[in-house]
Amino acid sequence: MDLVILIGSFFVMLFLGIPIAFTLCLSSILYLVLYTNIPLIIVAQQLLKGVDSFTLLAIPFFVIAGCLMQGGGISRRIVDFARKLVGWIPGGMAVVDIVASMIFAAMTGAGAATTAAVGGIMIPYMEEDGYDPGFASAIQTVGGVFGPIIPPSILMVLYAVASNESVSDMLLAGLIPGLLLGLILLLAVVAQCIKKGYRGAGKFELGAAIKSFGHAFFALLAPVIILGGIYSGKTTPTEASAICCFYCLVIGLFVYREIKLKDVCKIVYGGVKSAAGIMLIVAATQVFGWVITRAGIPQNIATMFTSSISSPLMFMLSVVVILLVAGCFIDAVPALLIFAPIFCPTAQAYGINLVYFGVVMVIVLCIGLATPPVGINLYVASSVGGQPVHKIIPHLPIPLLAIFIGTMLVLLIPDIVIFLPNLMNGAAG
């Protein structure tokens, strides 16, 4: 009965529309009051413990960096470079949208930020080129999925903290899967565009591409600085995120000169406000995670799986189904922090590599960013594209199917995930 109260109250409050952070805390408090004699001060202690981490400082820095990129003209130059590079391909503007989203993802680590920054520029461009507005918004909705997959990734950092895995390994492990999913999505979208009659924009001109690269050089240097610092061992992911934040500020102020000194506080405030929401959820999931661990839920689930399912593959497929459903109703950040402590012990019992397991979890939850009723990318694309959600949804199945096919490839071929971490660890050894 205690577990029914804990889980039941969580879902009741969730469907009543209570913010997820408060839902997590209130259901935890209800369980503690009804079934334990533990002083409620434990809630405050666990809230503090949830965010008392040097590693988690990377999250606000990456969020603020994303705001600085958007305000400083970095995202616009990335889009322009992508147009000159791949805009000539059939369905060129849709291809540009996806490529630009992947490049921007390599700077911010967040789906909503990627969707807003690239979509605000690309969706109007696509409409001007004759694309159906709903289709254009749908492409950007799915393009934003790469934000939390391609490193640096906020979700990868959170999973690393939740599972005690290496942050560097997790970030590196997302690179090849992210590129693979991007390639599959590009093929699917090009096929759609050919069928719909959307053509490329002109011919490829090497000179124009080189000139555009020159304009975007300092923007494109950001992921090199971030990932180069992390993988060379010169900086931790948190230090790299702070450097990225400072770099984007300097570029926006003194190189592109699109940020005015008077606007800095406003831009940073927007980033801090977004980061605060994420960190509040992180703190609340620490409370909820502590309670469900004390209630024995991870142990019970591990026993249930290992007693009824003998195959690690069947366990992985079961997790995918559970997370696909959960991702439709819970945002990726709380879903990851709720389910990682539950499923990781079971994955270990099956002998599954936790870095590989984490990447699969992140990718599957990222699909939920583009699916109703909770998918935040869907609503961000709707807002920046000026299209109602019901006109975007009919265009989502094929791009989402492409992402799902890529996810299955990653699940069935673990080497796609663990190749780079193993290579770097071997080189370091």
Image (cartoon, rainbow, N blue to C red):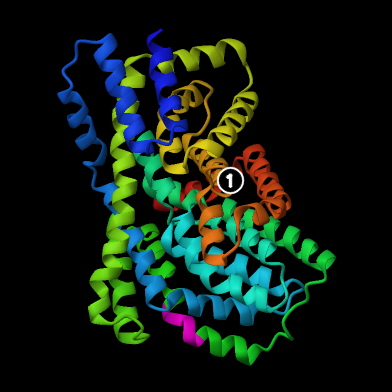
Q: Residue at x 57, y 41 (%)?
A: 364
- Look at the image and say whether residue 331 sits in the magenta stretch: no
The percent position of residue 271, horizontal first and vertical second, equals 32, 61
Q: Is residue 354 visible?
A: yes
Q: Residue at x 62, y 77 (%)?
A: 125
Task: Judge by depth and name the residue closer to the eye, 346 or 262.
Answer: 262
Among the 4 quarters of the image, the one containing residue 6: top left
Q: Above or below — where is 68 with respect to 286?
A: below
Q: Is residue 346 left or right of residue 265?
A: right
Task: Judge by depth and name the residue closer to the eye, 415 or 85.
Answer: 85
The percent position of residue 39, horizontal first and vertical second, equals 16, 18
Type of the residue with mark 1: Ile
The percent position of residue 357, horizontal first and vertical second, equals 52, 36
Counting the numbered discs, the total is 1
The percent position of residue 20, horizontal first and vertical second, equals 38, 37
Q: Above or below — where is 177 with respect to 162?
A: below
Q: Is residue 105 visible?
A: no
Q: Above or below — where is 183 with respect to 376?
A: below
Among the 4 quarters of the image, the one containing residue 139: bottom right
Type of secondary structure dominating the magenta stretch: helix
Q: Residue at x 75, y 78 (%)?
A: 200
In the displayed image of the protein, which residue is found farthest to the top?
A: 1
Q: Residue at x 44, y 51 (%)?
A: 171
**Please, what secondary structure does the residue beneath circle 1 have?**
helix
Task: Pick the quarter of the image with the N terminus.
Answer: top left
Residue wearing tag 1:
367
**Magenta highlight range:** 214-218
